[in-house]
Amino acid sequence: MARLSVNIDHVATIRQTRRAKAPDPVHAALQAELAGAHGIAVHLRGDRRHVQDRDVEILRKVSQSRLNLAMAAVQEMVRIALTVKPDQVTIVPERRDEITIEGGLDVILNSVQLKPIIRTLIGGGINVGFFIEPDLEQIKEAHRIGALSVEINTGSYVDANSARSKEETLNKIKDAARLGRKLGLSVHAGHGLDYLNVGRIASLTEIEELNIGHSIIARAVLVGMERAVREMLAEMHQCR
Ligand code: PXP
């Protein structure tokens, strides 16, 4: 079964609506780990709309699983990553006015800017990857410029609204994952996955890790974090 990395950004979103202390995403992370999550993911945005620097720093100290920091390819975030030393950095595109990430990074277009950033982060002992579309050319370029992993955006599969486009997008993800593995990359996937749509993605043996946030936090608000994580793990387990 793939590892489950739980993205806890939206626990911080609830906290930031009041600029209060609770709910603390650190508590949520520890509960997710107790329920069996293999990793914790946070996206530290330039505008700090949800996760704060202190969250990432404390998580690094107390989390007992893999810490994955999603961040834009900017010097401010590179400095933070080199200080905090997460296990994984996932470089994502970021636009200030977006509600959530809108698509994968264009590694081909931005390779000149991305290559030295990757090198610096890997030099700091961090596993670095890109969040990209299921596109073979993007996978090849990620590998060419030195990434150690890729996270394939599952958004197009999630949003596909006919059986045919579901199959097509699933096949693209499968081909991209296969190529990634063939090139020696760790292959992760995520975005928009929930309890109903996770099955076929979780069944792809090339994918080592799923990154799931909103659906787990949305359920956790109603049933508690531990149950929400256990139920997602059960869904993932059923499919392999
Ligand atoms: N992968 C990356 C790179 C992310 O930044 C996020 C959070 O936006 C996710 C996966 C999780 O997406 P979702 O919250 O839709 O499950």
Image (cartoon, grey):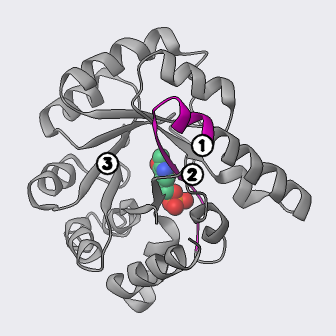
Badge count:
3
In the displayed structure, would residue 13 be above or below residue 190?
below
- Which sits earlier in the primary sequence, circle 3 or circle 2? 3
At label 3, the amino acid type is Asn
Q: Which residues are magenta?
A: 178-194
Left or right position of 217 against 180: left
Residue at horizontal 35 percent and vertical 12 percent from the top: 116
Q: Nearer the viewer, residue 174 or 29?
A: 174
Tell me residue 144's x, y (percent). Answer: 50, 16
Judge left or right: residue 184 versus residue 22.
right
How packed mark 3 is, by other alpha carbons closer than 10 Å (few <14, some 14-19, many 20 or more), is many
The tag earlier along the polypeptide, 2 or 1, is 2
Q: Nearer the viewer, residue 234 or 217?
A: 234
Crowding around mark 2 (Cα neighbors within 10 Å: few <14, some 14 to 19, many 20+) is few
Of labels 2 and 1, the one closer to you: 1
Is 137 in front, or is 107?
A: 137
Which residue bears the numbered disc 1? 177
Q: Residue at x 48, y 82 (%)?
A: 234
In what element is the residue under mark 1? helix
Residue reaching furthest left? 61
First in residue order: circle 3 vs circle 1: 3
Residue 70 inside the magenta-drawn segment: no
Kindly indicate the quadrant of the structure image that contains residue 77. top left
Q: CA distance from mark 3 to mark 2?
A: 21 Å
Q: Is residue 143 above or below residue 58?
A: above
Instruction: Please tell me the numbered disc located at residue 68.
Output: 3
Q: Quadrant of residue 164?
A: bottom right
